[in-house]
Structures are given as C-alpha cells and as structure tokens.
Image (cartoon, grey):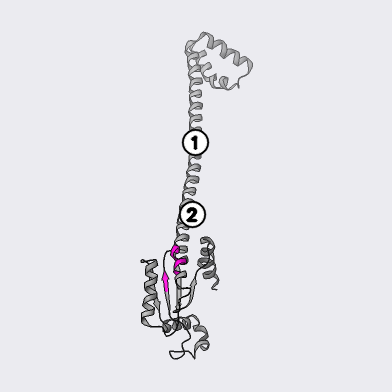
Amino acid sequence: MKNECDIVQDLLFSYKDGCLKQGSKEFVEKHLTKCEECAKIYKEMNNEEDSGNTEKTEIDYLKKIKKKMKRKTKIIIFVLILLIFLIIFNITVFISYNDYAGRVEIFLEDNISEEDVKNIENIIKEVDQNAEIEYKSKEKALNDLKERFKENENLLAGYGASNNIMPASYIVKTDKKYVTEIESRFINNNCVKKITVNTETNPYVYFFWYKIYLPITGK
C-alpha cells in the first residue's frame, strides 16, 4: 500500500496539470477515493495554488493602484505648478502695468519761476499725497537724450546749456486711478508745455509688447 502511495504522490502534480494518460489518471483517481492521506495531500496542493493565485492577484491589483496613484500624483503636481506659474505671472503683469499706467510726465515751459515749479508739485500732492515725484532739469533731459543717441554723437553735438532744446519736467508715479485727475489739473496751466500719459489699457498687451517683444527685438 505504501508503494502505491509513493507512486500516486509522484503522479499528483502531473494529474493536477492534466498531463497523465487515461490509465494513469484512473489509477490515481481510484487511489484518492480510498486513501485519505493522499487525498489530503492533493487537496493541500490545490489550496496552495489557489492561495498563491489570490496573493498574486492582490499584488497585481496593488501594483495597478500604485501606478494609477503615481500618474494622478504627477498630474496633480503638474497642475499645481501650472497654477503657481499663472498666479506669479499675473501678479507680475499687473504690478508692471500699475507702474506703467500710473506714470505721468509733465513738461514745463521755459523760464518759469521757482514758485511756479513748486506750485505744480503742490497740485500733484493735492491729488495724491503718496505720489512719487521726480524733477528732471533741462540739463538732465538733454544728457539723457544724448545718452540715448550716443551711437549718433553728431546728431546732438551742437546742443548745450546755451541752446538746450529740452524742457524740464516732473515725472510722477501715482496710482493709475489718479492719472486722469492729474492730467485734467494741468491741461490749461500756462506753466505746462505738455503732459504725457501711458494709454495702453490692456495689461497683457503692455506686458508682452513693452516687457518681452521690445527688449528682445531691441526696438
């Protein structure tokens, strides 16, 4: 009987895989019906395989979940980076635009008195007491122009203190909401030759044109 058990146990794996010929298959099946020990071994073999398959299925499922989580994490990180970039970009655009839109230059008539110059500054302060006001003299205006056209030195070579064609001016940096009021205060002022304000109303057009396109092209 023991020898028969040894033979059957050697054949169990092939029997389980369906590789036995019909005679050997019937021999194993007959033995399993009358031998509890061999039947128990065969049952344990099936249980081990089922357990292994279940574990493998669980591992494969966990791998898929992990892969999906990695993909979702990458997407979330990309979206967050994009949002941060857009936020920073928009902040930069609007800060730049506020500086641009809040700039006013007031060109003064020649030979006005110091009192007239001071009155102009006082009017600006009445509109916006926090405005940044810079006075540019005729000499500085001419020097700035010469610096701008320094590659063409002959263009302004004959101009100096005695025949300076450049006007003095006030450069005002204010909140853009005050620009219109400041402009209106000096339209009919006899001490003011000209007022320039920046007119581009689209922050993005300004940014791409003045901050990106012109610096890149050198225009």
Give the structural element (helix, strand or loop) at label 2.
Answer: helix
Residue type, label 1: Ile
Q: Write down the region rendered in magenta.
A: 171-182
Location of residue 163 in the rendering, given as x and y in whole percent from the top left corner: 46, 90
The quadrant of the image that shows the C terminus is: bottom right
In this rendering, the count of numbered labels is 2
Query: Which of 119/209 is in front?
Result: 119
State the residue position of label 2.
86
Location of residue 181 in the rendering, given as x and y in whole percent from the top left corner: 45, 66
Q: Which numbered disc covers residue 65?
A: 1
- Furthest residue toward top: 34
Q: Is residue 150 magenta?
A: no
Q: Is residue 196 above or below residue 175?
A: below
Residue drawn at x 36%, y 81% as measured from the top left? 114
Give the structural element (helix, strand or loop) at label 1.
Answer: helix
Q: Is residue 57 above or below residue 204?
A: above
Query: Which of 179/132 is in front?
Result: 179
> Dot 2, how many residues are within 10 Å of its Cα: few (below 14), some (14-19), or many (20+)?
few
19 sits to left or right of 62: right
Residue type, label 2: Leu
Location of residue 6 in the rendering, given as x and y in whole percent from the top left corner: 50, 16
Q: CA distance from mark 1 to mark 2?
A: 31 Å
Q: Is residue 177 magenta?
A: yes
Residue drawn at x 51%, y 20% as measured from the top left? 46
Residue drawn at x 52%, y 8% as measured from the top left? 34
Q: Is residue 206 above or below residue 141?
A: above
